[in-house]
Image: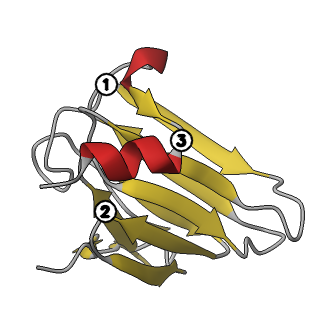
Amino acid sequence: MSLIQLISFPPLGDDRGSLVALESQQSIPFDIKRVYYIFGTQQGVARGFHAHKQLKQVAVCVTGRCRMVLDDGKHREEVWLDSATKGILIEDMVWREMHDFSEDCVLLVLASKHYDESDYIRDYAEFKEKTKS
């Protein structure tokens, strides 16, 4: 099974422009409890480098692009997020890294739970240990 689970967000609109609607339990496969966005990331800086014990997220570049790396402890895959109509579903217990941010990148993230520092795994060796079968 692939770690890369892309979600298409059909653009709505007319000659005035486009709109994408993101709705809990519709285009987003969970109830949205938290929304944040990453922007202004300096060239050469990578972000993420953690997993969540019990949190689902959908990430979408509303402008610009970045390279997402996902790792379940056994497989590592990557994909470019480069469209406001394409998101990626990130399940719990998946290590995530974000690389190669364009200057104009705004990465929007929708989360299934409120922020909880105790849900993070920030050490890759600990993550690998927890994902052993």
Q: Position of residue 27 (x, y in %)?
A: 18, 56
Q: If you read the primary sequence from the N terminus, does the residue marked by circle 1 or circle 3 appear first?
A: 1
Three-letter amino acid code at the position of disc 2: Gly
- The residue that mark 3 highlights is 123
Residue 11 vs residue 16, the one in the foreground: 11
Q: Residue at x 28, y 34 (%)?
A: 53
Q: Position of residue 48 (x, y in %)?
A: 59, 50
Q: Is residue 41 depicted above or below 2 in this figure? A: above
Label number found at residue 73? 2
Crowd around label 1: few <14 · some 14–19 · many ≥20 (10 Å): few
Q: Marks 2 and 1, how far apart in space? A: 27 Å
Residue 132 vs residue 48, the one in the foreground: 132
Q: Are marks 2 and 1 in contact (CB under 8 Å)?
A: no
Q: Secondary structure at mark 2?
A: loop
Three-letter amino acid code at the position of disc 3: Asp
| Residue 93 seen by the camera | yes
Q: Residue at x 32, y 54 (%)?
A: 94
* Quadrant assignment for the N terminus: bottom left
* Quadrant assignment for the C terminus: bottom left
Q: Residue at x 59, y 57 (%)?
A: 107
Three-letter amino acid code at the position of disc 1: Lys
Residue 87 vs residue 90, the one in the foreground: 90
Q: Are marks 3 and 2 in contact (CB under 8 Å)?
A: no
- The residue that mark 1 highlights is 33
- Could you tell whether 120 is left or right of 74 in the image? right
Q: Is residue 53 depicted above or below 21 in this figure? A: above
